[in-house]
Amino acid sequence: MPGLPASAYTDPAVWAAERQAVFARSWLCIGHTQELPDPGDARTFEVAGWSLIVVRAADGALHGHHNVCRHRAGPLLWHGTACSGATRLRCRYHGWTYAPDGRLLATPGFGDDVDRDALGLVPVALDTWRGLVFAWIGPDPAPFADHVADLDAAAAHVPLETFTVVRRVQHTLACNWKVYVENYQEGLHIRWLHPGLAAEVDTADYRVVPRGRCVVHHVAPRGDDAVNAGLWVWQWPTLALNVYAHGMSVERIVPTGPASTTIDYLFAVRDPSTDTEAALAMSAQVTAEDVAICEAVQRNLASGAVDPGPLSTVHEQSVAAFHALLHHAMARATAPTA
Ligand code: FES
Ligand SMILES: [Fe+2]
């Protein structure tokens, strides 16, 4: 089975098509409810060129909007920031003011000729699954229960709700999002690229099993105290849950451009008194090794020297499963409507 052509990772037209076909039309994990625990908490989330704002209203409900004022497109919150105690959202440019549910309340300096009812914030559908917040950026969200069904099955035995978020770490990569997703999908590279991780897991007994919109990694630890023993599961299109003995990392693969991606980790622990330094150090080491290879692959794809060759039918069927989900999303977006 061949891989994707090199142009799929470099062509700005492919990126533009994926923004609409994949990222505007999928449920995307954007964070954790523990990042917005109280009424008035608000923060931005950026994905695929969109800036979103999520705010918890006085009644406890979460509301999602594009972080784009209806006057002249100013932000309600600066890119990458958060606030607390917000009863209203005020644009940073000329002060138009919105309710947490998106209604336009005030337009300082304007008369009564502004149709406020027609100029609310553009909504983004939100839903939550076991503490994680998901957003649907485009119109007509698909049923959320369908999206999380495979993830539900894979993680049913893990008490995710009881974990406490303790840290957020971001890495910026100079590669297309698909290069990193494909890297996540297979354990074939572990023995070659990750010597520290290879010492902890039995790479000869490493299996990846596609299940609908998920790929589940079956990883056997080498010893009882191996810090990387547990469940690793990826969910279409850009979420990975890595559950370890001490807790988990919620790994979001956030596309930011045709050749740029941010890896956004939320680390959560089973017991807040646990010393997580060893686990965090291992994660940082493995991520640094993955960043190096993904950026090298991106440079080589961009050189035009070759198109990717065959995928292993034993170790990389999960990469093929990712490609099948991608093809389905792209075909669905271009299919004529009846
Ligand atoms: S752009 Fe928001 S008030 Fe002008
Ligand atoms: Fe890796």
Image: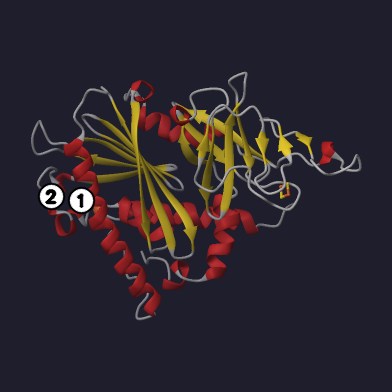
Q: x, y (%) of residue 307?
A: 37, 74
Image quadrant holding the N terminus, namely bottom left
- Residue shown at 16% from the left, 38% from the top: 278
Side of 172 where 203 appears, left or right:
left
* Label 2 CA crowd tier, 10 Å (few <14, some 14–19, many 20+): few
Q: x, y (%) of residue 10?
A: 46, 70
Give 119 or 194, whichever is nearer the viewer: 119
Dot 1: element: helix
Which amino acid, by three-letter code, is at mark 2? Gly
- Residue shown at 53% from the left, 63% from the top: 15
- Residue shown at 20% from the left, 50% from the top: 285
* Label 1 CA crowd tier, 10 Å (few <14, some 14–19, many 20+): some
The answer to whether one can see residue 240 in this image is yes
Give 333 or 36, whichever is nearer the viewer: 36
- According to the image, label 1 marks what residue? 285
- Residue shown at 43% from the left, 35% from the top: 150
Give 38 or 297, whichever is nearer the viewer: 38
Q: x, y (%) of residue 140?
A: 68, 41
- Among all residues in the image, which is located at the extreme bottom? 305
- Which quarter of the picture shows residue 135? top right
Give 131 or 201, whichever is nearer the viewer: 131
Total residue callouts: 2
In the image, which disc is placed on residue 177?
none
Side of 147 where 318 appears, left or right:
left
Which amino acid, by three-letter code, is at mark 1? Gln
* Cβ atoms under marks 2 and 1 closer than 8 Å: yes
Closer to the N terminus: mark 2 or mark 1? 2
In the image, which disc is placed on residue 196?
2
The response on whether ligand 2 sits within 8 Å of label 1 is no
The answer to whether one can see residue 228 in this image is no
